[in-house]
């Protein structure tokens, strides 16, 4: 069993850690997660790949290669970055790998950006 540690330094089981991370991503997002997503979407090619994935229920790597005119290795790299930012999930079915957008992450990212924006606004005068 893999040993994981919570933010207090106490060990937790992997299943509980995954459940906590999943719940955390739906409710709030820390600054480093916002930064990671922002960096992932800052690349023009990656943004277009993410747009193509988000427009459909799921898309194969081969479809992305043909749509975007980039090499399979480049698509693989961009999918890895998007996956690490938890923007997409990739699932293998036989010889094909399908990608799907994680809409909960985008919702949490949007809320986090709104929270950052509200925090930087000057207080309203009454």
Image: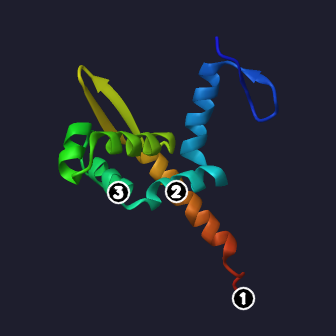
Q: Earlier in the sequence, mark 1 or mark 3?
A: 3
Q: Which residue is mark 1?
A: 125
SS for dot 2? helix
Q: Which residue is mark 2?
A: 39
Quadrant housing the N terminus: top right
Which label is found at residue 45?
A: 3
Q: Are marks 1 and 3 in contact (CB under 8 Å)?
A: no
Viewer can see residue 60: no
In this rendered view, identify the residue nearer to me: 22 or 88.
88
Of all residues, the one furthest to the bottom in this rendering is: 126
Residue at mark 3 to residue at mark 2: CA–CA distance: 12 Å
- Can you tell which quarter of the image residue 6 is in? top right
Q: Earlier in the sequence, mark 3 or mark 2?
A: 2
Q: Position of residue 91 (x, y in %)?
A: 34, 28
Residue at 64% x, 51% y: name it.
32
Mark closer to the observer (2, 1): 2
Of all residues, the one furthest to the top in this rendering is: 1
User: Dot 1 surroundings within 10 Å: few (below 14), some, or many (20 or more)?
Assistant: few
Which label is found at residue 18?
A: none
SS for dot 1? loop
Mark closer to the observer (1, 3): 3
């Amino acid at each position: 069993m893999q040993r994981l540690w919570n933010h207090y330094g106490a060990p937790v089981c992997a299943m509980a850690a995954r459940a906590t991370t999943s719940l955390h991503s739906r409710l709030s997002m820390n600054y480093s997660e916002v930064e990671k997503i922002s960096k992932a979407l800052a690349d023009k090619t990656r943004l277009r790949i993410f747009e193509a994935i988000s427009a459909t229920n799921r898309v194969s790597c081969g479809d992305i290669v043909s749509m975007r005119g980039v090499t399979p290795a480049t698509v693989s790299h961009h999918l890895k970055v998007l996956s690490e930012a938890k923007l997409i999930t990739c699932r293998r079915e036989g010889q094909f790998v399908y990608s799907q957008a994680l809409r909960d992450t985008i919702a949490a990212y949007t809320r986090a950006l709104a929270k950052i924006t509200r925090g930087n606004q000057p207080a309203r005068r009454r």
